[in-house]
DNA sequence: TCGGTTGTTTGATCCCCGTCAAAGACCCCG
DNA sequence: CGGGGTCTTTGACGGGGATCAAACAACCGA
């Protein structure tokens, strides 16, 4: 499985993965490991598989001709992605960090009912994302983003961001500078607290919820 | 069918519909008629039916607490809508103009395959809408909107807009003033031509396509 | 046909966020 | 432990679109 050449980008393998790094991406049981920024599928490719994120994260995006990038979805640990209209991928999918994926074949394994539920949830999430990007201020977008991620990770109060400020900006329709300024604002207001750049503790969930619109 | 009380808002019935206006909404064969701004379903309601637009148009939207509105989809003649995750409507649906709808029951009439295709198309459209709203300028958004509508009406070169500037603004994340200014700009550039406020002729489709990003 | 209401256009001004710039923090890898 | 590249933060400034305001056009009902 996962024999495509494009995920061979030799990464700066982190210590935790090093023992497995011989034939990258190595398989642990059914889990394939990917370096950050590895392509999982490309726009125009035939879609045949679903993927389940075991750890790490995936960005699904499209590029405009002039290089602007819009990320339409992140997929976090425990989530399934790869289902697309017409059996052809309309977007690119890449890892944002070191990521483990397992494959789910479309034929079998999942019953039509589950597939339908997955499709409808994806539609709902895209539409809710639209609410955020269409009508909210920078601060509200960042707030909504943090709430969404925290809920999806199981209502945690400390989030380990699995993506860069650039990824977050391209997801929310903001620049990295505005993303950073919004995070700083939330910190200065005492709503969140940073333990390192990528680890955010939500100190006042009520106030965070309030400013999401 | 269509016995809910909320579409009884006595409308300013247009001449064309007047003969039928006795028991509103009247049925012509299987088609129910609705005045502009009639509610088809509300957020939180149990979803049991699909609706097919025979003529007119539908807006699907949600309101923020402070009154900001985001329209997540328009549905035009020939399109089917009403399919939602969890069997409960997550959005409001209203007519934008005088509209005829026919009901499609979820159980039967449509095979699971068709339902799946509908869900996946809706997800794709929401994501493509996200590309427009997330990263494009006002002029690009209006351009993309016109192209999308023209294609969905069957690659026509003259569009009868079934919605107001306010609807368009709330769909694209713009104010009515910006929508109006963008239309004026397209007119001044000779890309489109207006025959009345709601009728747009696309004079130079190539140039329109160019500025969609 | 006429008057009132609603929707649209255009102008003037303001502000949020994008852009440009540079310092600072973090993370690898040697 | 130390050096270099990448990512992040912060500051200064400018512009695109929001806001405020008013004239104008379209629509509908009387």
Image (cartoon, coloured by chain):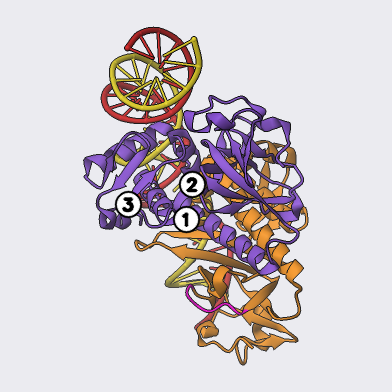
Chain colours: A orange, B purple, C red, D yellow
**Residue A60 percent coordinates (x, y):** 55, 65
Identify which residue, B16 or A174, lies in the foreground. Answer: B16
Q: Residue at coordinates 33% horizontally, 42% vertically from top-left?
A: B200
The region drawn magenta spans A43-48
Q: Chain of mark 3?
A: B
Would you name the residue on which mark 1 appears? B131
Q: Nearer the viewer, residue B37 or A16?
A: B37
Please identify the quadrant where the N terminus of chain B is shown. Answer: top right
Label for residue A2? none
On screen, residue A211 versus residue D21, left or right, reads right
Q: Is residue B206 above or below residue B30?
A: below
Is label 2 in a helix, a strand or a loop? Answer: helix
Residue bearing mark 3 = B157
Q: Are marks 2 and 3 in contact (CB under 8 Å)?
A: no
Q: List x then y, in percent, for residue A28.
A: 73, 86
Q: Chain of mark 1?
A: B
Q: Which residue is mark 2?
A: A178
In-front residue for pair D13/B189: B189
For the stretch drawn in magenta, what is the main secondary structure? loop
In this picture, is C27 found above or below B16? Answer: below
**Image-quadrant location for residue B94:** top right
Residue A91 pos. (x, y %)? 51, 68
């Amino acid at each position: 499985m996962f024999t495509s050449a494009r995920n061979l980008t030799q990464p700066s393998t982190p210590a935790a993965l090093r023992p497995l790094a011989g034939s990258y991406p190595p398989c642990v049981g059914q889990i394939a490991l990917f370096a950050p920024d590895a392509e999982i599928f490309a726009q125009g490719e035939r879609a045949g598989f679903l993927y389940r994120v075991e750890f790490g994260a995936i960005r699904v995006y499209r590029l405009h001709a002039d290089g602007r990038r819009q990320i339409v979805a992140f997929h976090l640990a425990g989530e399934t992605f790869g289902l697309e209209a017409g059996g052809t991928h309309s977007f690119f999918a890449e890892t944002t960090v070191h990521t483990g994926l397992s494959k789910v074949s479309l034929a079998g394994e999942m019953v039509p009912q589950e597939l339908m539920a997955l499709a409808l949830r994806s539609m709902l999430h895209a539409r809710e994302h639209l609410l955020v990007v269409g009508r909210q201020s920078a601060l509200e977008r960042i707030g909504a983003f943090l709430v969404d991620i925290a809920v999806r990770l199981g209502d945690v109060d400390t989030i380990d961001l699995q993506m860069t400020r650039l990824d977050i900006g391209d997801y929310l329709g903001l620049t990295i500078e505005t993303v950073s300024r919004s995070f700083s604002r939330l910190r200065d207001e005492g709503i969140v607290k940073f333990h390192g750049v990528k680890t955010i503790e939500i100190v006042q969930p009520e106030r965070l919820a309030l400013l999401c619109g």
